[in-house]
Image: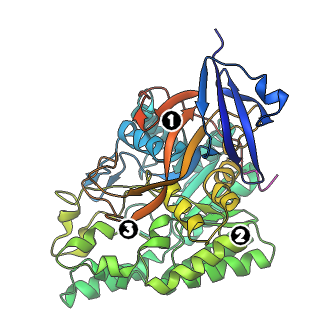
Amino acid sequence: MSSRTVIRGGLVVTASDEIHADVLVEDGRVAALAATGTPAAEAFTAERVIDASGKYVIPGGVDGHTHMEMPFGGTYAADTFETGTRAAAWGGTTTIVDFAIQSVGHSLREGLDAWHAKAEGNCAIDYGFHMIVSDVNQETLKEMDLLVEEGVTSFKQFMAYPGVFYSDDGQILRAMQRAAGNGGLIMMHAENGIAIDVLVEQALARGETDPRFHGEVRKALLEAEATHRAIRLAQVAGAPLYVVHVSATEAVAELTRARDEGLPVFGETCPQYLFLSTDNLAEPGFEGAKYVCSTPLRPREHQAALWRGLRTNDLQVVSTDHCPFCFSGQKELGRGDFSKIPNGMPGVENRMDLLHQAVVEGRISRRRWIEIACATPARMFGLYPKKGTIAPGADADIVVYDPHAEQVLSAETHHMNVDYSAYEGKRITGRVETVLSRGEPVVTEREYTGRKGHGVYTPRATCQYLN
């Protein structure tokens, strides 16, 4: 039995076009688009008709950077694949790419299998995996080739967190050389973790234990230095590079310079760096712990460089780095020692709305909103045009978005499994109304109609900016 849906009368917004069109969905895919009111559109018939008059019809968001159930600092991220993907759907995101973790002394395959076991049968929306490479050796390098062949086409390394995920320059170079040969994309957490650890030790010795010192020791210059080093190592290896969660003016400058040289270097930032700052880390009492993440929040003046980078395409993607820890019982592990606060913030539900707010404020255009949140992450991670656009043949991952509705972000009303909102009390114009994932309604007029297990694992092609 084929199932058909027609979405009528909305403004269809993709990265390239805006058109008042009706959308015909059949068997989980976009079957056709036709300008609203034309005979072609009038001929669309379906069992389910969604009225999108006065609304936007946009592709479901693609969040290329999430950490569901991630172990960190003696605890686990508070969102499971079930709760996290449900919250993502509420926020208009229909695909996540999460990170499977290789533990030191273990194979990539073991890490990937463990993450498949966590996610399978639990997700409300579709998902893929990147692979965190913590232990570069000859066996790991061979495994990278096998993973690329089966659709895990990106590998994350860390210049930070010595003793946990850290790779030295030689290990990074070897992995980059392998990626240059197999078509994989190296994703880099670019902070000089060795130097940061010295500054952490010195700060604690001085009695500087509050959350705000987390931002002060993880200096912008050490993000910029690591970004520069990663770029040059990638250049030596002949490999592309994707720098995650860029937060500092100086790091943006390194990416801009590399791109001006014609290097295949890409950059991602996150809503927390665009909308929050060290003012939040310095909130009284222990409240600042809510905003501890790495790279850290920067002084407010860094925001201008990030917005400019998004407008000039020196930054291409906005992902969330969603890695939530509850304030009560988890963030509190760092009372009296900021270095023990679990690093991470919730945000998978807020990204599309916050970026729409940037459209309202004139920071970016509507099409750029869709580009940085849907189309580019889909292309970057080998999912386009199955994901990230509304076009015949694409998966019917579609959001009906009300650009005029007003809402106030709050832990009282969000669906993430965490006891605070990083944006508590923030007023937003724009709200998700209805969400389809492969044609199935996951959110219907602000009611959750999805189910765990609907979301399926999605193997990925290699980065589509390199072909």
The answer to whether one can see residue 199 in this image is yes
**Residue plotted at (58% across, 68% down):** 170
The residue beneath circle 1 is: 125
Residue furthest top in the image: 1
Say whether residue 165 is left or right of residue 208.
Answer: right
Q: Earlier in the sequence, mark 1 or mark 2?
A: 1
> Residue 464 in magenta?
yes
Say which of 354 and 48 sits in front. Answer: 48
Residue 330 location in percent, x, y? 21, 58
Label 1 CA crowd tier, 10 Å (few <14, some 14–19, many 20+): many
The residue beneath circle 3 is: 293
> Residue 349 in magenta?
no
Residue 313: numbered disc: 2
Magenta residues, dominant SS class: loop
The answer to whether one can see residue 224 in this image is no
**Separation of residues labelled 2 and 3 (CA atoms):** 25 Å
Vertically, is 195 above or below 361? below
Q: Earlier in the sequence, mark 1 or mark 3?
A: 1
**Residue plotted at (44% across, 68% down):** 272
**Which amino acid type corresponds to the residue marked 3 in the rendered image?**
Cys
Residue 155 location in percent, x, y? 58, 53
In terms of secondary structure, where does tag 3 sit? loop
Q: Which residues are magenta?
A: 463-467
Say whether residue 242 is left or right of residue 291.
Answer: right
In terms of secondary structure, where does tag 1 sit? loop
Which of the 4 image quadrants contains residue 50? Answer: top right
